[in-house]
Image (spheres, grey):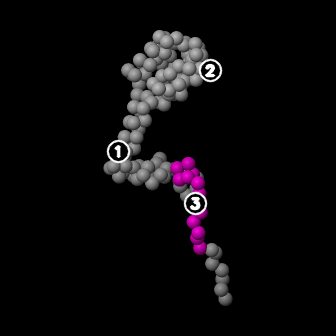
Amino acid sequence: MPRLLGVDIPNDRPTVISLTYLYGVGPKTARELCHKAGVNPQVHARELGEDEVARIAALLDKDYVVEGQLRRQVNQNIQRLKDITCYRGVRHRRGLPVRGQRTRTNARTRKGPKKTVAGKKGVKDLR
């Protein structure tokens, strides 16, 4: 199982698919990496030689922001929004959707499971 930037990439998949297991590497970036490193994208990851893995790792370090560095950068951006107390920062702080989605219904991914609040019962007519 080849190891790139502290992440084990799966053996049984083609190289171009295995590279997408790295945070910040999508299908397009994976194809670019294979092309620049001179690696056949359809070869399974277990068949890569040490020199090919080293070339891919060198390209990732030199040209791309991935894994820990990218996670840190994203967290710093969110923290900056929170510090300047802009609208997006407040939404992050409260755990609500940030990009304008409705919250009256849905939004369960951000808000978590429903918390039932005891409300008023229906007011009946008194004669």
Q: Which residues are magenta?
A: 108-120
Residue for badge 3: 115
The mark lying in front, picked from 1 and 2, is 2
3D distance between C-alphas at marks 3 and 1 = 30 Å
Where disc 2 sits, the SS reads: loop
Expressed as whole percent of the image width and height from the top left, the position of residue 41 reads 55, 16
Expressed as whole percent of the image width and height from the top left, the position of residue 72 reads 39, 36
Q: Is residue 121 magenta?
A: no
Residue for badge 2: 12
* Horizontal relation, residue 80 to residue 20: left or right: left
The furthest residue to the bottom: 127
Please give the name of the residue rendered at 59% of the width and 73% of the height, measured from the top-left corner. Answer: 120
The mark lying in front, picked from 3 and 1, is 3
Q: Mark 1 or mark 2: which comes first in sequence?
A: 2
Q: Mark 3 or mark 1: which comes first in sequence?
A: 1
Where does the C terminus fall, quadrant-wise? Answer: bottom right
Query: Can I make out residue 116 in this image?
Result: yes
- Name the amino acid, label 3: Lys
Whether 53 is drawn above or below 119: the answer is above
Crowding at mark 1 (Cα within 10 Å: few <14, some 14-19, many 20+): few
Q: Mark 3 or mark 2: which comes first in sequence?
A: 2
Crowding at mark 3 (Cα within 10 Å: few <14, some 14-19, many 20+): few
Residue for badge 1: 80
Expressed as whole percent of the image width and height from the top left, the position of residue 1 reads 56, 20
Please give the name of the residue rendered at 46% of the width and 48% of the height, measured from the top-left corner. Answer: 98
